[in-house]
Image (tube, rainbow, N blue to C red):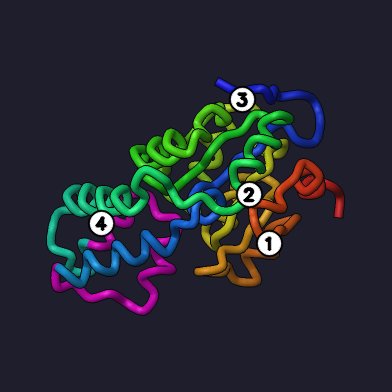
Amino acid sequence: MAFSGVPTPGPVQAVIFDLDGVLIDSEQVWDEVRRAFVAERGGRWAADSTAMMMGMSTAEWSGYLAELGAGDSPAEIAAEVRGRVAARYGDAPPLLPGAVAAVRALADRWPLALASSSPRALIDLVLDRSGLVRYFRETVSSEEVARGKPAPDVYLEAVRRLEVPAGAAVAVEDSENGLRAAAAAGLAVVAVPNEHFPPGAAALALASARVAGVAELTAEVVLAAVAPR
């Protein structure tokens, strides 16, 4: 395993990535799959359904789809949607340009973790098939904590597992609820605004650094996120 980064004294002791929208171009895949699933089962998609589910844990979004009239139990909904998303990913998950290089570069300097709303099965699938699994010391799914984003739980669990203070970790996030979750956990945040579902100005204001895409994420950007403003 390529865990070369180690916690060291200094303003940054770890970097924690989101998955969907930061490393893989997948937010619209989730949206398309869920919309189709609800329509097939005679449910009614609400105008704010997409925004409502951004960052939800598996238990939260499957329960929400059941409330929309998707029919099956939340557990059955989760299994079916998860399977459809995995099929869309196939053998080559849709990595965003520069994702692999950015992860490799930062792993040489700091321990990395992943804090994602994706189900554990899909986190493992993406990291394994992309070859990125070797660079992450810890990975946390919101399935494994009490609440999904925008609650801070998944980030608090990530820093707990890394054994670093929240204030010495930097999160890399793309979505409204992801930015809010990381900031609420006390992490400095680098925003990589999602082009399909851009976060609002208030959420972006919680980030202390911003890049247009993960290809622009460097050690200098990470350090800038914790620099006094």
N-term mark: 3 or 2: 2
Magenta stretch contains residue 42:
yes
Q: What element carries label 2?
A: loop
> Looking at the rendered structure, which numbered label has been put on residue 212?
1
Instruction: Give the CA distance from mark 3 to mark 1.
Output: 30 Å
Mark in front: 3 vs 1: 1
Which tag, 4 or 1, sits closer to the chain's start?
A: 4
Q: Is mark 4 on a helix, strand or loop?
A: helix
The quadrant of the picture occupied by the C terminus is: bottom right
Q: What residue type is labelled 3?
A: Glu
- Which residue lies at the image location 55% right of the left edge and 20% below the top edge? 1
Instruction: Give the residue pinned by disc 3.
Output: 163
As drawn, the label of residue 98 is 2
Q: Outermost residue toward the front?
A: 91
Residue that mark 4 sits on? 63
Give the residue type at disc 2: Gly
Q: Do the residues labelled 3 and 1 touch (CB within 8 Å)?
A: no
Query: Does residue 207 appear anywhere in the picture?
Result: yes
Q: In which quarter of the image is residue 52?
A: bottom left
Left or right? Give the position of 16 relative to 66.
right
Q: Which of marks 4 and 1 is in front?
A: 1
Q: Which amino acid type is shown beneath numbered disc 4? A: Gly
Q: Quadrant of residue 204?
A: bottom right
Q: Where is residue 197 in the image (x, y as percent from the top left)?
A: 51, 69
Q: Can see residue 146?
A: no
